[in-house]
Amino acid sequence: MCIAVPGKVTVIDEELNVATVEVGGTTKHASADLVPDIQVGDYVLVHAGFIINKLDEDDALETLKLFEEYMGVNLTEDRGK
Amino acid sequence: MKYLDEYRDPRVAKALLEKIHGSAGRIDREIRIMEICGSHTVSIFRAGIKSLLPENVRLVSGPGCPVCVTAMSDMDRMIALASPPDGTDTLVATFGDMIRVPGTKTSLEAEMASGADVRIATSPLDAVMWARKHFEKSVVFLGVGFETTSPTIAATVLKARKSGLKNLFVYPAFKLLPPALVALLETPDIAIDGFLCPGHVSVMLGADAYRPVAARYEKPCVIAGFEPIDILLGISNICDQLAENKHEVANAYGRAVSNGGNVKAMGILDQVFEPVDAPWRGLGTIPASGLGFREEFAAYDAIRRFGLDSVEAGSEPKGCACGEVLRGLMDPPRCPLFGKACTPDSPVGSCMVSSEGSCAAWYKYSS
């Protein structure tokens, strides 16, 4: 029930403060009332019709680097191939 | 998709599992890790994580499914809203999991079948839409959830106030996570070595919220996301800490969770609600572990509006071990009703009803 799904903001309706978010191939509308400064292109978590946070790219990359240290492979480059 | 595929990579899973086996091998006893969140429970079963862990590492499910921990007294009152004693025409709006939870005598589903207007919402904002459309009805949203969900409902109340809606109410049955952790750790016979803390509750709360618990009770608290690798990363961190005799808060979900949490969302929550003592299924009443409306927002409180204090609360179903399951004292298959009198098709207790309940997850993935 407390699950949230990651998606990418494609449009923002500034009058209603509602974002259109692409989530796994479909789009959802989500209120941007709970998180300040949502921009088009942001990766966000959507829960129960609300954006609950942005996903932080630097922190995500840091975790991936940790994995790479464990394994000695480059995950991010692998994905690009 | 970015931020998703990397957390399902089997090569990373293999490396992490080797790491977990290494740390756990240095600990000469059983390690009991409690995952508090129902969504973690489901992910752990779905990915088959239990079978991959070392023999001395045991995952135990805790009271992290908000539907499961809703007390029978709250359930009975919420069901009473479908046909309130004063004869008001109501529309009860709720997240889907609540529909089938049995009360003492009936359920929302049964009330629906008898003609009550009960609707499933995917967002609390649906209730605003229904309240605008149905001025002749009182629309009541059932406020069930932890810190992930309660701010979305607080924001909905603010929206209702801004639009001047007078026919929207909320039944506040919210739960707060940190007081539940303390209550669990104060319970005799509960042997928990570390907590896998819920990812999305922590998005709101922030990692700092766990620091007093980790320090006072000397238990590692590690925040994890919901992909298989997120969970393995969390388990690995707890095992590392135990092997090194540490008890810190660690954040294995850094891409979503900060130390301070979502300050704006928690501010909105605090504007509308205040902590109150709350009854939990299986845990009893825990001080300051729920949320009630602040006086300024009392007009939105369904308990006051519909005089629900007078609804008599019944007792838990006979033989049901949801209480023990929710405290991690019993694995679901040891409940005498499990898989016999109690199945997902015909559930007796809340842990079998909710898709995130531990009994439902055991039933679905273990049998």
Image: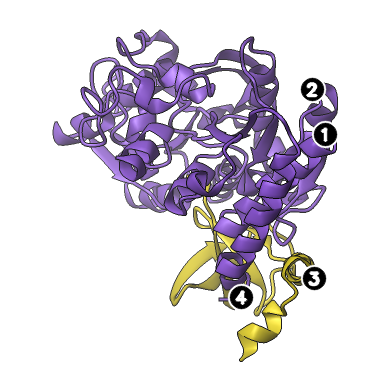
Marks 4 and 3: same chain? no
Colour of the chain lettered A: yellow
The extreme bottom residue here reads A81
Give the distance between the C-alpha atoms of the residues marked 4 and 3, in whole angstroms: 13 Å
Query: Quick one: SS at disc 4?
Result: loop
The residue where tag 2 is placed is: B217
- Callout 4: 10 Å neighbours few (<14), some, many (20+)? some
Answer yes or no: do the residues labelled 2 and 1 have beta carbons within 8 Å? yes
The residue where tag 3 is placed is: A58
Q: Chain of mark 1?
A: B
Image spot of residue A30 (x, y percent): 53, 63
Lower sequence index among marks 1 and 4: 4
What's the coloring here?
by chain
The residue where tag 1 is placed is: B247
Colour of the chain lettered B: purple
Answer yes or no: do the residues labelled 2 and 3 have beta carbons within 8 Å? no
Answer yes or no: do the residues labelled 1 and 4 have beta carbons within 8 Å? no
Lower sequence index among marks 2 and 1: 2
Answer yes or no: do the residues labelled 1 and 3 have beta carbons within 8 Å? no
Image spot of residue B4 (x, y percent): 58, 69
Q: Chain of mark 2?
A: B
The residue where tag 4 is placed is: B2
The amino acid on which the numbered mark 2 sits, given as a three-letter code, is Tyr
Image spot of residue B260 (x, y percent): 82, 47
The amino acid on which the numbered mark 3 sits, given as a three-letter code, is Asp
Give the distance between the C-alpha atoms of the residues marked 2 and 3, in whole angstroms: 32 Å
Give the distance between the C-alpha atoms of the residues marked 4 and 2, in whole angstroms: 37 Å
The amino acid on which the numbered mark 1 sits, given as a three-letter code, is His
